């Protein structure tokens, strides 16, 4: 019996329970001649209460079942495999499990299945099948039984309204907890892999080393150099490109924001603001080829006029394009911050005989500064984490330099190159990607936190 | 005088005003001797030239008329109170006097407003200078989010009134003294203006206005966000300031108008109904509308 069916059943149960609940409440009112206004809750709340309370256990059972089923089935198979091959090592056991599952789904004639293991394949199929049947039975019984039980309890005194409130509060809370849980598990998994990396490469070397060359031998027969895992050049490259991006984005974004919030007539503002925000919606891969195909060669052509050495994947080209990309972050948040400065402050300045630009310089910008700074920090953390532009326009080779015309690499570029292609997960080369990822995460997290605190302080100021 | 106030207290039972309770008014009665500035002003003699002259002023928001053919004069060293029900155009009118309405989209002013004999809408009048000479204090205290010192120094700085840091310090101190705030803040000039209490903030805004050396100070319900004690401080301050400046105060509180002003103008639905010495307006109003408003028959 399929999951789709169970889904339909739950929906059906929900709507049926609701309408029966409403009808029942109305019937009770009629039979006992208790007017609805003397009920603790309106009939719709009785319906909602029964519907929610009856379907929720079904949904919970469904989820738990899907979480636990593979674990239980694997466990049963393992026990049986151990009976067939006594003393089999763990990794071979896992391989067998994988083969059995592949054979059962008919995915692969690629794996050869021994005759001795054949019965386990059919056993797996049966287990899975019966598990689904049992699940369907349990869900249907629980759903109908709880609906029937709750149906009996409908009475003028039932506090259905409060119960619905409690259930909804619980559901909202569960969603919040779920989001936090997912975030935390991502962090923990990255942390876990990073710890494995730091078993191979000391943390100190990672944080202070000035050479980065992770391309070590993956198999004993490969010829390769010894790896260097000093992350400084990689982070230096990230900061160089982000810094160039800020040099572009901060002035342009801020001036654009001043124009839109203070000078532009409403009609023009209604055009400019959305257009600027569209910049944020352009896929970064488009910026990437813009950088690689146009800005890169352009920078090169200009620099050659001045007899300057330019790498074709210069930090300058990547930074310029990234700067254009983050303009909307700066301009939009600055515009919001400046528009939020109360009219009374502007009038205060005008009433002292300030001109518009004096008002902006001495009153508006200082008053909006926390919001502007918050926007800039968000833009920075966006720049640091940006991947696609630099993958296309920055170099792969880590070089420790401050020259914007040189080619540098970034953290995100390295992570992409380390995790694409031929990889093996217990090799320091691959694991170093997680360490870089963790460092990046910590950095952007702190920046965001900082931005958040500033913005929050700023909000309080005018409340 | 006492007689008039006593009569006024009787009628104010009906008035909608709530910024003062009776007790406060009676406290004020015993204090009234301290308000020395009230008496010296007498009606303008022919020799005394008005400082602002308004003739046939109309104000429109888009197509809606908010002020209808108002003509009145404002003299130096007087406090003119503007009273009237909410929405009758009091704020609109005083915002004309320093062209603050320019900042409102779709607001149009017609008629003549002469400041020192010059039409404020003419090319000869620089709006920035006009606003420096006709200062304004708003309903809600609006100190800049800067230090107390910077708040007061802002105006003198943009107008280049001080040649040196010392002169600027002096302007700040004198302005704060005149606003009666110096003793309370002299040890914390570098603290944020927002750290002060509401009443102190309002006095800071007054100090800020005084610092650019205006000739007229416009006040739009300057006490309506303040408690009675802070209000009493501001009223005392107005009495002192009126020895130097012309003050136009919009107020919701009839008692306040009675206490602080030399002349009172009553507005109704955008028109000036009556203007005259405060005592006359409150005791022998010549128009029925004025009387009804004063006695609280409508709000
Ligand atoms: N910015 C504006 N746009 C349109 N109408 C306005 C504006 N400001 C005030 N008004 C209208 O003008 C009239 C007078 O308002 P206002 O001067 O604020 O009255 P008061 O200060 O006496 O309470 C009111 O009817 C009000 O609705
Ligand atoms: Mg008003």
Image (cartoon, rainbow, N blue to C red):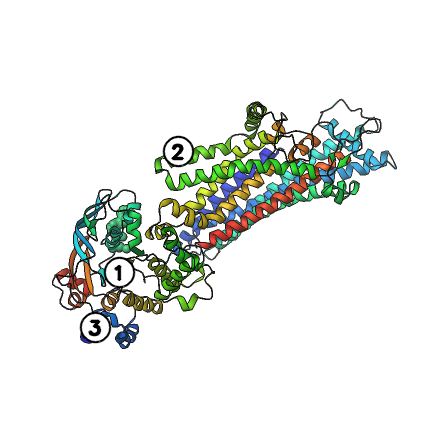
Disc 3: CA contacts within 10 A as few (<14), some (14-19) or many (>=20): some
Q: Which residue lies furthest to the front in this view?
A: B163
Near mark 2 (Cα within 10 A), the count class, few <14, some 14-19 or many ≥20, is few
Q: Quadrant of residue B206?
A: bottom left
* Chain of the residue that carries numbered disc 3 in the rendered image: B
Q: Name the residue nearer the viewer: A33 or B215.
A: B215
Quadrant housing residue A99:
top right
Circle number at residue B249: 1
Q: Are marks 1 and 2 on the same chain?
A: no
Along the line of sight, the residue nearer the viewer: A383 or B237: B237
Report, in whole angstroms, how far the alpha carbon at label 3 lies from the one at label 2.
Answer: 59 Å
From the viewer's perspective, tell me whether residue A419 is left or right of residue A31: right
Give the letter of the chain under mark 1. Answer: B
Residue drawn at point x = 64 percent, y = 26 percent: A311
Disc 1 versus disc 2: distance between alpha carbons?
42 Å
**Residue beneath disc 2:** A271
Label pair 1/2, CB-CB below 8 angstroms: no
- Is residue A104 at all visible to an observer of this figure? yes
The residue furthest right is A87
Q: Picture coordinates of residue A188 (x, y %)?
A: 68, 44
Q: In the rendered structure, the residue with mark 2 lies on which chain?
A: A
Label drawn at residue B82 = none
Q: Name the residue under label 3.
A: B5
């Amino acid at each position: 019996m399929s999951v789709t069916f169970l889904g339909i059943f739950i929906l059906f149960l929900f709507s049926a329970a609701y309408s029966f609940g409403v009808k029942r409440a109305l019937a009770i009112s009629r039979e006992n001649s208790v007017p609805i206004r003397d009920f603790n809750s309106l009939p719709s709340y009785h319906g909602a209460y029964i519907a929610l309370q009856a379907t929720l256990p079904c949904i919970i059972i469904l989820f738990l079942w899907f979480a636990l089923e593979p674990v239980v089935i694997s466990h049963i198979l393992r026990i049986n495999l151990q009976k067939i091959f006594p003393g089999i090592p763990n990794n071979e056991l896992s391989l067998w499990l994988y083969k059995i599952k592949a054979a059962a789904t008919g995915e692969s004639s690629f794996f050869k299945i021994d005759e001795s293991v054949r019965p386990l394949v059919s056993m797996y199929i049966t287990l899975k099948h019966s598990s689904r049947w049992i699940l369907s039975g349990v869900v249907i019984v629980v759903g109908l039984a709880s609906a029937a039980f709750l149906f009996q309890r409908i009475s003028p005194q039932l506090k259905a309204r409060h119960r619905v409130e409690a259930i909804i509060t619980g559901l909202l809370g569960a969603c919040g907890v779920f989001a936090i849980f997912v975030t935390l598990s991502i962090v923990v998994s990255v942390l876990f892999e990073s710890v494995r990396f730091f078993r191979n490469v000391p943390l100190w070397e990672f944080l202070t080393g000035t050479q980065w060359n992770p391309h070590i031998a993956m198999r004993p027969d490969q010829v390769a150099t010894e790896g260097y895992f000093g992350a400084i050049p990689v982070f230096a490259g990230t900061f160089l490109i982000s810094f160039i991006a800020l040099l572009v984005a901060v002035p342009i974004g801020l001036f654009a924001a001043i124009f839109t919030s203070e000078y532009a007539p409403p009609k023009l503002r209604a055009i400019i603001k959305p257009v600027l925000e569209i910049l944020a919606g352009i896929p970064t891969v488009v910026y990437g080829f813009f950088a690689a195909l146009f800005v890169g060669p352009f920078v090169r052509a200009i620099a050659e006029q001045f007899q300057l050495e330019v790498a074709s994947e210069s930090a300058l080209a990547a930074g310029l394009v990234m700067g254009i990309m983050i303009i909307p972050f700066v301009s939009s948040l600055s515009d919001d911050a400046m528009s939020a400065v109360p009219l009374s402050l502007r009038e205060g300045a005008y009433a002292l005989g300030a001109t518009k630009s004096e008002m902006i310089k001495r009153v508006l910008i200082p008053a909006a500064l926390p919001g502007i700074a918050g926007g800039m920090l968000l833009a920075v953390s966006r720049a640091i984490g940006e991947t696609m532009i630099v993958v296309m326009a920055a170099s792969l080779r880590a070089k420790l330099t401050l020259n914007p015309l040189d080619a540098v690499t970034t953290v995100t570029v390295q992570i992409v190159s380390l995790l694409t292609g031929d990889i093996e997960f217990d090799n320091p080369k691959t694991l170093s990607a997680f360490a870089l990822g963790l460092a990046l995460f910590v950095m952007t997290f702190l920046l965001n936190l900082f931005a958040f605190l500033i913005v929050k302080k700023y909000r309080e100021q005018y409340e | 005088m006492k007689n008039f106030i006593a009569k006024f207290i009787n009628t104010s039972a009906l008035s909608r005003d709530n910024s003062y309770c009776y007790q406060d008014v009676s406290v004020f009665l015993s204090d009234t001797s301290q308000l020395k500035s009230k008496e010296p002003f007498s009606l303008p003699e022919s020799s005394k030239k008005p400082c602002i002259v308004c003739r046939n002023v109309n104000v429109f928001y888009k197509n809606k008329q908010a002020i209808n053919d108002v003509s009145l004069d404002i003299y130096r060293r007087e406090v003119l109170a503007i009273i009237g029900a909410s929405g009758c155009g009091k704020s609109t009118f005083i915002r004309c006097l320093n062209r603050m309405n320019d900042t409102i989209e779709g607001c149009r002013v017609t008629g003549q407003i002469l400041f020192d004999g010059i039409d404020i809408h003419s090319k000869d009048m620089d709006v920035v200078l006009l606003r420096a000479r006709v200062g304004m204090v708003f309903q809600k205290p609006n100190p800049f989010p800067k230090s107390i010192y910077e708040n007061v120094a802002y105006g003198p700085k943009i107008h280049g009134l001080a040649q040196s840091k010392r002169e600027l310090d002096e302007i700040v101190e004198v302005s704060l003294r005149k606003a009666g705030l110096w003793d309370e803040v002299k040890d914390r000039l570098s603290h944020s203006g927002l750290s002060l209490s509401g009443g102190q903030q309002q006095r800071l805004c007054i100090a800020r206005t005084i610092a650019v050396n205006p000739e007229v100070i416009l006040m739009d319900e300057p006490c309506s966000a303040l408690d009675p004690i802070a209000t009493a401080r501001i009223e005392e301050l107005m009495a002192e300031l009126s020895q130097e400046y012309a003050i136009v105060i919009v107020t919701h509180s009839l008692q306040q108008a009675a206490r602080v002003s030399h002349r009172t103008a009553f507005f109704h639905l955008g028109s000036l109904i009556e203007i005259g010495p405060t005592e006359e307006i409150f005791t022998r109003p010549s128009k029925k509308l004025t009387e009804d408003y004063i006695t609280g028959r409508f709000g």
